[in-house]
Image (cartoon, rainbow, N blue to C red):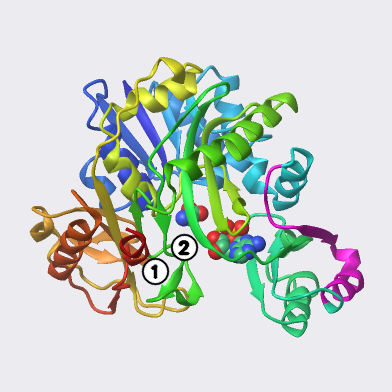
Amino acid sequence: MNVLVIGSGGREHAIVWKVKQSPKVTKIFCAPGNAGIAGIAECVAIKADDIDSLVRFAETNRIDLTIVGSETPLVKGIVDLFESRGLKIFGPSKAAAQVEGSKMFLKHFLKRHNIPTAYYQTFNQTEFEKAVQYVTHSLPPFVIKTDGLAAGKGVAICQTAEEAITTLKEYFRDKVFGDAGNNIVIEEFMSGEEASLFVLCDGKEYVLLSSAQDHKRIGDGDTGKNTGGMGAYAPAPVVTKEILKTVEDAIIKPTLAGMTAEGYPYKGCLYVGLMMTKEGPKVVEYNCRLGDPETQVVMPLVESDAFDLFYACASGNVSSYELKLKDSSAVCIVLASHGYPDEYQTGNMITGLEETADNAVVFHAGTRNENGKTVTSGGRVLGVTAVGYGLKDTIERAYDAVKKISYKDIYYRTDIGKKGLQRQ
Ligand code: AMP
Ligand code: GLY
């Protein structure tokens, strides 16, 4: 089988790494990939959102299965395009990808189907004054979200009405997120611990991968700015068996049934972002793809054939797939560039990558090859993942491996997995 993976981050490296272990896979391509992926797959210089070039590539190279890593091509309709040409692809249709592509769509959908989530109101750009009135007369904190995709940055948590009004000006008047901010959602702030679940669906049935927990803030102790994710661990002890049952009954099943009833059955990965509130688990967000960095801990815990899993989902028969998960823990420490998520330098040479092999696998996110050397090329550079028995030992193994790697301006959190340990 020839496989094409679309995207260029740590998530795509972890997918390529796992799918390649299948004896059925003869050739694996990644578009556009990165320096780490280039070591195990053939990277193709096509951007992830250039869906016309991607479909031409898949036809010319007789691709048997395409796995889409990032959301942009999904929201653009890559799945509809591939399927109209008879090509097998893992991911939701354009209509179903709206769960991530439009926060307004998602919130209205959750409300229609009585699925627990934060209380909300929506406003369009002609309703600036109305939105100002709303925040002035409601209790803070507020969570203000752009309706459209904003590269993970369109969510502002505002502690006061003044802060909220500043944010409203930025979204509606200064258009800092362009058209993505033409419509906004103002949500009630939920407190609690977050966790992520990956629901792999075939349009009818689903299987669940390990629960995981991301670390979104830049600093230890969950302080400082929001980032794309500074590390993850799986499984997440906060998702107990009882909570998982509640989430399946009150969230996952009604979501999949609702989407089918409304004419867009869900196929691909439904990423369920949860908040464990005092009233029980509630939906923070859905994504239409696997999460990053969570994929870097969830994929290594899949024992069974991952190619078969993605193929079964794309083919509508995941119920015939026997998912086996490892009875282990996985921990991923993201190594970033100093300054991220704001300004940072790139082009710094990375050393020590080979010395980690005994303890960990290193997934690349922002790296490139320069004259045969691997150098930094992004804010998040590497994801160092260890797999082991017990969360505590696995955290130690991951940090032992991290210490072997160096480059100028290296930055990482030192408390990945700590919340999981405290729960145990
Ligand atoms: P989103 O893009 O919707 O996932 O939001 C990004 C992050 O903002 C989430 O992972 C949460 O940490 C936080 N967040 C979003 N919505 C809420 C909410 N209603 N209450 C508290 N935190 C939230
Ligand atoms: N880990 C959060 C995300 O993938 O959106």
Kindly tell me whether residue 43 is visible in this rendering.
Answer: no
Q: Classify mark 2: helix, strand or loop.
A: loop
Mark 2, residues whose alpha carbon is within 10 Å: few (<14), some, or many (≥20)? many
Answer whether residue 134 is magenta in the image: yes
Which tag, 2 or 1, sits closer to the chain's start?
2
Residue placed at 34% from the left, 26% from the top? 323
Q: Say which of 376 and 200 sits in front.
A: 200
- What range of the chain is rendered magenta? 115-135
In the displayed structure image, the side of residue 293 where residue 20 appears, left or right: left
Quadrant in the picture for the N terminus: top left
Answer whether residue 309 is magenta in the image: no
Q: Classify mark 1: helix, strand or loop.
A: loop
User: Which residue matches tag 2?
Assistant: 228
Q: Are marks 2 and 1 in contact (CB under 8 Å)?
A: yes
Please state the horizontal and vertical placement of residue 58, each as a whole percent of the image: 44, 27
User: Which residue matches tag 1?
Assistant: 379
Which quadrant of the view contains residue 63?
top left
In the displayed structure image, the side of residue 418 where residue 186 appears, left or right: right
Residue type marked 1: Gly
Please state the horizontal and vertical placement of residue 359, each as a whole percent of the image: 12, 55
Please state the horizontal and vertical placement of residue 422, each as a whole percent of the image: 34, 65
Q: Say which of 87 and 253 sits in front.
A: 253
Mark pair 2, 1: CA separation? 9 Å
How many numbered markers are drawn? 2
Residue placed at 32% from the left, 49% from the top? 297
Quadrant in the picture for the C terminus: bottom left
Ligand 2 within 8 Å of the CB at mark 2: yes
